[in-house]
Amino acid sequence: MGRKPCCAKEGLNRGAWTAMEDEILVSYINDHGEGKWGSLPKRAGLNRCGKSCRLRWLNYLRPGIKRGNISDDEEELIVRLHGLLGNRWSLIAGRLPGRTDNEIKNYWNTTLSKRNQQSHGAGCSNHPQAKPLPPAPQAGGEAQALPEGTSSSPIRTKALRCTTTVLAAAEGFHEQGRAAPEHVAAEDQLGDCLSIGSIDLDLEGIELGFMMSPWSGGADGVGDQHFGAPGAEADGLEELLGLGVAGGGGDGHGGLGDLELAWLC
DNA sequence: AATCCACGCAACCGCCGAATT
DNA sequence: AAATTCGGCGGTTGCGTGGAT
């Protein structure tokens, strides 16, 4: 499909934003609201591409952004969510109010991935950090993750890049010769490295029920504020992850639509 | 004091799916 | 139905900074 490349236009400012540009962008968005990023620069009088404006706003200028000083609780939550979701930074960020996907991605790449590497080889403990990083979910990657000759019918709600975790569970069932499991206990498949809880898939009703195990809650409640009481039954992934519930800081990230479930049939 | 190097972070790039034409 | 546009995401790059030599 033909598509003009963003930011290809010559003469646009690139690189670090100036205070003046920030001011113009904030002022414009305060007056006119977000959106229409493609035409925003022109309307606002910014010599930037729309994507650049969007990125600047979402990651740095938006109200409520927290910068730096990632707490231990936030860090643990990042690690846990990364173990569950892989490199789904926007989803992870949606669980950390005030944090952006870019910041979490950077934090992971600079800090946590190193720590993960250091602890690699120490065996699979109860901590996901001790587990090798899951392969980054790639577009269409779920298909190749399935055994040959296996057809899959993913519930593809929005994101193609998928939850490797759930697929891994499905794979495990395939290996057990169960073509169409009625119930998938993800915890069994994932081992205690991911003590997220058990996942029940009712394929007939395409209903999901989750029994959650305790998440370590921190002093500020980051770890458990969205997940309900331990053992409580949630209504699905959305509640499990707190996606779309309480807005996750209202940044528009996350949501059940971002998740994909796959099963073998 | 000067240079080198490693690290962290901000920003860019390319791709994708959804929405629109 | 096909083409195009838009918004969004994750991976990667490159610059600035601080520490080591």
Image (spheres, coloured by chain):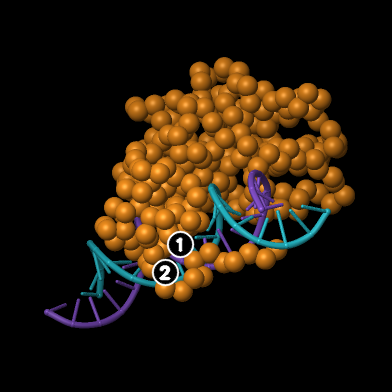
Chain colours: A orange, B purple, C cyan
The alpha-carbon separation of the residues under discs 2 and 1 comes to 7 Å
- Quick one: A100 or A219, which is closer to the camera? A100
Q: Amino acid at mark 2?
A: Leu
Q: Looking at the figure, which quarter contains the C terminus of chain A?
A: top right
How packed mark 1 is, by other alpha carbons closer than 10 Å (few <14, some 14-19, many 20 or more), is: many
Q: Residue A102: percent from the left, percent from the top?
A: 44, 51
- Compared to residue A14, the image places residue A108 above or below, namely above
Q: In the rendered view, does B2 fall on the left or right side of A31?
A: left
Please report the residue visible at 42 percent of the width from the left and 55 percent of the height from the top: A43
Residue A97 visible in the picture: yes
Residue A76 visible in the picture: no
Secondary structure category for the residue under label 2: loop
Please report the residue visible at 46 percent of the width from the left and 74 percent of the height from the top: A10
Secondary structure category for the residue under label 1: loop
- Quick one: A123 or A137, which is closer to the camera? A137
Q: Residue A119: percent from the left, percent from the top?
A: 47, 49
Chain at numbered mark 2? A
Q: Residue A130: percent from the left, percent from the top?
A: 52, 45
- Quick one: A226 or A183, which is closer to the camera? A226
Give me the disc on residue A49.
1
Q: Looking at the figure, which quarter contains the N terminus of chain A?
A: bottom right
Q: In the rendered view, does B5 fall on the left or right side of A175?
A: left
Q: Earlier in the sequence, mark 2 or mark 1?
A: 2
Please report the residue visible at 42 percent of the width from the left and 47 percent of the height from the top: A58
Give me the disc on residue A12.
2
Q: Amino acid at mark 1?
A: Cys
Q: Are marks 2 and 1 on the same chain?
A: yes
Question: CB atoms at circles 2 and 1 under 8 Å apart?
Answer: yes
